[in-house]
Amino acid sequence: MIKLNVNDETSRLRSVLLGTARSNGGVPALDEAYDPKSMLHIKQKTYPKEEDMVREIEAVEAVFNKYGVQVFRPKIIENYNQIFARDIGFVIDNVFIKANILPDREQELDAIQHVLSQIDPEKIIRFPEEAHIEGGDVMPHGDYIFVGTYRGKDYPDYIIARTNMKAVEYLQKAFPNKKVVSFNLRKSNTNAYENALHLDCCFQPVGDKYAIIHKNGFLVEEEYQWLVDHFGTEHVFEITAEEMFNMNSNIFSIAPDVVISERNFTRLNEWLRSKGITVEEVPYAEISKQEGLLRCSTLPLVRE
Ligand SMILES: NC(=[NH2+])NCCC[C@H](N)C(=O)O
């Protein structure tokens, strides 16, 4: 049995689910894409190739092996995108919450049944259907749970708005001892530079006291400011629109002093090293074309 435990983004990782790019289904039709960055690459004919993405994920698996992290993989569904394991569920404390994910992605949950069956069934919950939530929007942070959402009335018009306020309310009810703080995120169906698909596309805590953030990802300045003040200005690394587009906030921590990052994130990786953090660089630029990166393709199950 897996003894779930996740209460933050950075404590030493022991067990993780890692997505897979095998049998990814090839280039989707434009109207099948569910994020603007994939759409851009479909139009430009630069959509990533399966073999390249498989190679990129293998590089991440090698880092996990190096650090003795137990790795689970989804069962492969033919011609189906299963790269972004993060979104299909998430662990808070010792509870696995099955996400009420975008209907296009629902089958991804079936493919991890062999993992869920190793978890105490009493510790697996799912919110009612109308509470939309995806793991990319959810970040436990000690006493807090940070959640990305979109509060606009036009929520249903946005395929890139994945977590609604109903889910925020259920989350608070499920974890009465945690303080759930939600953030209204900027959404665009068509422009990836103006789209914070999930909270982890514009923000992530790193190290023992730091955070990466992109101001324009937030719709409400006070909410952005709350986060900056929470970590302290001097501990926050502000990324540009270009860096957010390249998914710099979507690295993944193995420990407070070890992160996996993309090899082209020069400015970020230098900053991380200057804080005494070991940066395990991997190639992930092809996967990034689908508007997701390292945090998106990993689902931590056990941290110390
Ligand atoms: N946690 C994340 N940010 N996940 C990114 C998911 C990207 C994927 N193309 C989608 O739109 O669903």
Image: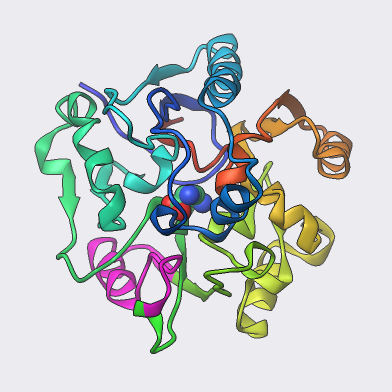
117 to 43, vertically: above or below: above
Q: Is 163 within the magenta?
A: yes
Q: Residue at x 33, y 63 (%)?
A: 177
Is residue 214 visible to the viewer in this orientation of the structure? Answer: yes
Q: Nearer the viewer, residue 298 or 171?
A: 298
Q: Residue at x 30, y 48 (%)?
A: 105
- For the view shown, which residue lies furthest in the left direction? 122
Q: Where is residue 101 shown, x and y percent of the image?
A: 29, 55
Q: Is residue 189 left or right of residue 203?
A: left
Q: Quadrant of residue 147?
A: bottom left
- Looking at the rendered image, the quarter that the N terminus falls into is top left
Q: Quadrant of residue 301?
A: top left
Q: Where is residue 84 shown, x and y percent of the image?
A: 44, 40
Magenta region, residue range: 157-180
Q: Is residue 172 left or right of residue 121?
A: right
Q: Is 153 within the magenta?
A: no
Q: Residue at x 50, y 58 (%)?
A: 35
286 to 90, vertically: above or below: above
